Amino acid sequence: MTTAATTSTQAVPRRRILAASFIGTAIEFYDFYIYGTAAALVFGTLFFPTFSPLAGTLAAFATFGVGFVARPVGAVVFGHFGDRIGRKTMLIVSLLTMGVGTVAIGLLPTYDMIGIGAPVLLVICRFMQGFGLGGEWGGAVLLATEYAPKNRRGLWSSFPQLGPAVGFIIAGAAFLVLGATIPEEAFNSWGWRIPFLASAVLIVVGLYVRTKIAETPVFEKAMKEQEKSKAPIVEVVKRQPRTLLLATCSFILAHTLFYTITTFSLSYGTEVLDLNKNMLLISAMVAAAVMGIATPILAVYSDRVGRRRVCMGAAILAMVWAFPLFALINTGEPFLVALGMSVGMIAFAALFAPMGAYLPELFATRYRYTGSSVAYNASSIVGGGLSPILATQLVASTGSSLPVSAYVVVIAALCAVCIWFLREAHTADLTVDPVDHPT
């Protein structure tokens, strides 16, 4: 039972709140990205050896996509209990769920060991990863946003938004170190398991940090003054359908940019362009670092000028950069490849950084966990799950990266239209329920 003292930002140190919101997303995105990297590099041959190289890659990306299908399911389940029980408990459970799925992947037998059972078990573990991540992001950004001062919500929510950058850099570094220290044959045999098993250590640290925080004061105040929502997903669809649809569609671009650059580009570069795997990983890590630097800067800027303006800039930059991105990757020159990826990740950060505060600001407290989580994770089905598969198929059927660039332009245009019709919310009072109406 929390006391009045533990529900204030003075009683709960800011560093503890920010650390708890950041560390979980960093760990969970690390878990998610080691899968994406392994899917691009080795899972095709380990779990689908009877397929052609192209079909094996597509199948590996299909299992990667299972995680994105699972994420909205996790968002609904964790959102339901997060809106009824509290943010803190669901943050702990989501981290455990994701962690068990990740460590289990590191223990899986391959196709050569047990046949068709191997990819089946891989899909189950991947579903667990996605299910856990579906509840992670919404809880983490709510922890930061609902504790933050009104004029600093963008800044505070940027801490969980740093998770993708840090998680990807750690994941990429793990694969680089393994590639440099063990032979390729050993890596393909057992070395790829190490990043998955190492996740267990990170999870213990994350759980320790999260057990030291209290429930958010905004949620506790709402629960004292309002009746708990019996079915948050039903209520958000009934009360704010327009906002839910626009927010979901606007965020497809973020997932499309991130996974096109960090996942598809690895397989495209190694299998189509025959580029060095380590060079591509390093370029992607540089781009992720640039994104990490840009995230708090753009989040603070959104506190000053509003979320919509920064998000609209992201959509425009994505449209402008879609063709130069692959033109630079196609050169095979390390500096140009890193440049292309880095600018693309700045476009991603310009959308992702404000969204940490923007999505929670758009929904009422009674179903805020559910609304923001569903919008974020439902958009990942198209942006993260389908984009690498579609991009791989487009290149295979046309022999060119131009259709992939055109696809990014279309998604960016959709984002711009949806952002235009969303209301501004950076000055909104989180204790007052928003109205679902046009700007």
Image: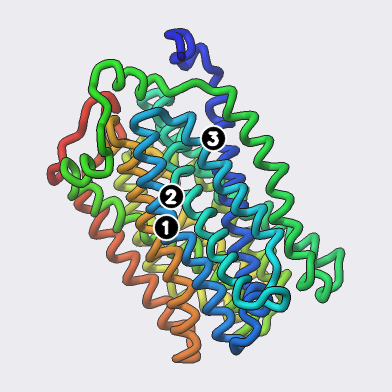
Q: Is residue 329 above or below residue 372?
A: below
183 relative position to 71: left or right: right
Judging from the image, what secondary structure is the residue with disc 1 in? helix
Mark 2: amino acid: Phe
CB contact under 8 Å: marks 2 and 1: yes
User: Measured along the vertical axis of the image, is residue 214 above or below residue 10?
Assistant: below
| Mark sitting earlier along the chain (2/1) | 1
Residue 46 in sight: yes
Quarter where residue 270 is shown = bottom right
Instruction: Say which quadrant the C terminus sits in.
Output: top left
Kindly give the residue lying farthest to the left in the view shown.
437
What residue sits 27% from the left and 27% below the top?
Answer: 228
Q: Residues within 10 Å of mark 1 (few under 14, many from 20)?
A: many
Which percent across, then down, holds residue 96?
58, 42
**Residue behind mark 1:** 254
For the residue pair 285 and 197, the one nearer the viewer reads as 197
Which image quadrant for residue 57?
bottom right
Residue type (three-letter) at the residue carrying disc 1: Ala
Q: Earlier in the sequence, mark 3 or mark 2?
A: 3
> Going by the image, does 53 lie left or right of 246?
right
Mark nearer the N terminus (3 vs 1): 3
Residue in the image at 59% along x and 71% along y: 119
SS class of the residue under badge 2? helix
- Alpha carbon separation for disc pair 3 and 1: 26 Å
Q: Residues within 10 Å of mark 2 (few under 14, many from 20)?
A: many
Please state the horizontal and vertical placement of residue 126, each as a whole percent of the image: 54, 60
User: What residue do we see at 76% from left, 63% from top?
Assistant: 176
Which three-letter amino acid code belongs to the residue tagged 3?
Ile
Residue highlighted by disc 2: 352
Distance Cα–Cα, label 2 vs label 1: 6 Å
- The dot on residue 92 is 3
The percent position of residue 365, horizontal first and vertical second, equals 29, 30
